[in-house]
Image (spheres, coloured by chain):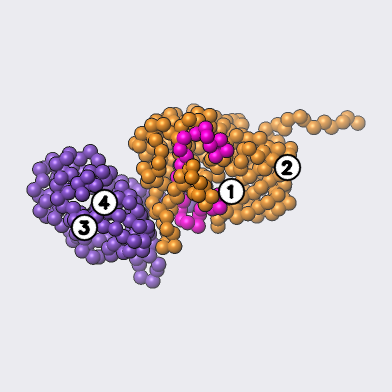
Amino acid sequence: MRDLLAAHRFTSGFPEGLVDELAACALGTVRWEPGTVIFRQGQQADRCYLITHGDVALEIHSPGAQPRIVQTVNGGEVLGWSWIFAPFRWSFDARALTSTEAIELDGARLREDGACDLPAEYRYLLMARFARLIVDRLHATRLQLLDVYASRD
Amino acid sequence: MQAVTEPLISPPMAPRPARILERWDETEDTFTLRLEPPEGSFAFTPGQFNMLYVFGVGEVAISISGDPDQPETLIHTIRGVGSVTKALRDLTVGDVVGVRGPFGNSWPMDLAEGHDVVFVVGGIGLAPLRPALYHVLHNRASFGRVALLYGIRSPRDLLYEDEITEWRGRLDMDVLVTVDNADRTWHGSVGVVTKLIGRAPFDPHNAMAYVCGPEIMMRFTGRELVTRGVAPAMIYVSMERNMKCAVGFCGHCQFGPAFVCKDGPVFRYDEVEELLDIREV
């Protein structure tokens, strides 16, 4: 498990000690067949998934309308950070588009026990890495909102 | 009576008549015209454009989107959004348009030889890049890995669907397509095109990148390519401005110190990077 974690893009550049701590919070690997619903909006969020292979769709539902895919998460990326912030509920549905494999981290343990025991430097590195992901996602969402490919007179 | 003689070379401001041989829709608002070349053949290089004239309506700059190795075929893919392009949309087979061109510079295909080649395309930007893609595929052994990264608004905005399908099936190139939003009938990627750059299998330190799309998309794509390790001097972008004369007389398409029609439309990224951040250029 530790080697698998160390090979994932999320941990690139992390000190070995931090990878060890993350490995201690790993629950194992999971595999989803295409179409599998990984989690649903509103459910308790206490897991973090480091996708190693495959594609996952994040979907949003509104009454009376077909679900919309707002983003796909692919191999090398991270699925889910709702476990970091209260009230720890998923904001979207996640559904496997292809045969997908991931490292499953115990988010609840990471935030409540494990992370609190981490040296401050490690905690900073971990949160900075998640912040980077969130900022990248925010930038991407802003670009999507610009609708740059729309027809303009 | 004095004999009227035809000039050997058409002056650049005189449109030459070209008949529409074929017309088909690509998407809801985008269509392709196959024109009969004015002199039976129409040589051009990838990246160049023509001025298409709808008689009585006006003229518009449209990239040539056909195969440069088939000069007997003149292809333009056009989005019907303005008065002239909408008038072009309403024309039918047999109608005649005026053609001036080809104008502008080209994608520097020779500089890419021996390197991986990455095409990063947004929306209708695939049309100006398709001739370059044809060139690479016709001379496949001269290039390293080839990747097409294509971002569109929704699955129904996919251009050249049959060719995209064919290219995806090739073993010597990678095609990644992403859309801004989709429903469940779409099984591909959803997100911005810049996200595909990290997933594409190419060596950023030995790659040439050709980028074409909305200006804001090219700005963010350039940054992402550089972040991934592509040298700024190995990135080329195709600019779009309001081109009128197409020969650098009128100044409508001024872009900093350059005229897009004459000095472009293809520019090296490191030479225009700062201009891309200026609100009014």
State which mark lies toward you, 2 or 4.
Answer: 4
To which residue does mark 2 refer? B17
Pick the residue in front: B84 or B202. Answer: B202
Whether residue B61 sits left or right of residue A84 in the image: it is right
| Residue at the image point whose x is 49% and y is 42% from the top | B172
The residues colored magenta run: B136-163
- Res B25 label: none
Q: Which colour represents chain A?
A: purple
Residue type highlighted by circle 2: Pro
- Res B78 label: 1
To which residue does mark 4 refer? A50
Residue type highlighted by circle 4: Leu
In the image, which lettered chain appears orange?
B
| Residue at the image point whose x is 73% and y is 51% from the top | B94
| Residue at the image point whose x is 35% and y is 70% from the top | A63
Q: Secondary structure at mark 2?
A: strand
Residue type highlighted by circle 1: Ile
Q: Is residue B153 covered in magenta?
A: yes
Is disc 3 on the same chain as disc 4? yes
- State yes or no: discs 1 and 2 in contact (Cβ < 8 Å): no
Callout 4: few (<14), some (14-19), or many (20+) C-alpha neighbours within 10 Å?
A: many
- Res A47 label: 3
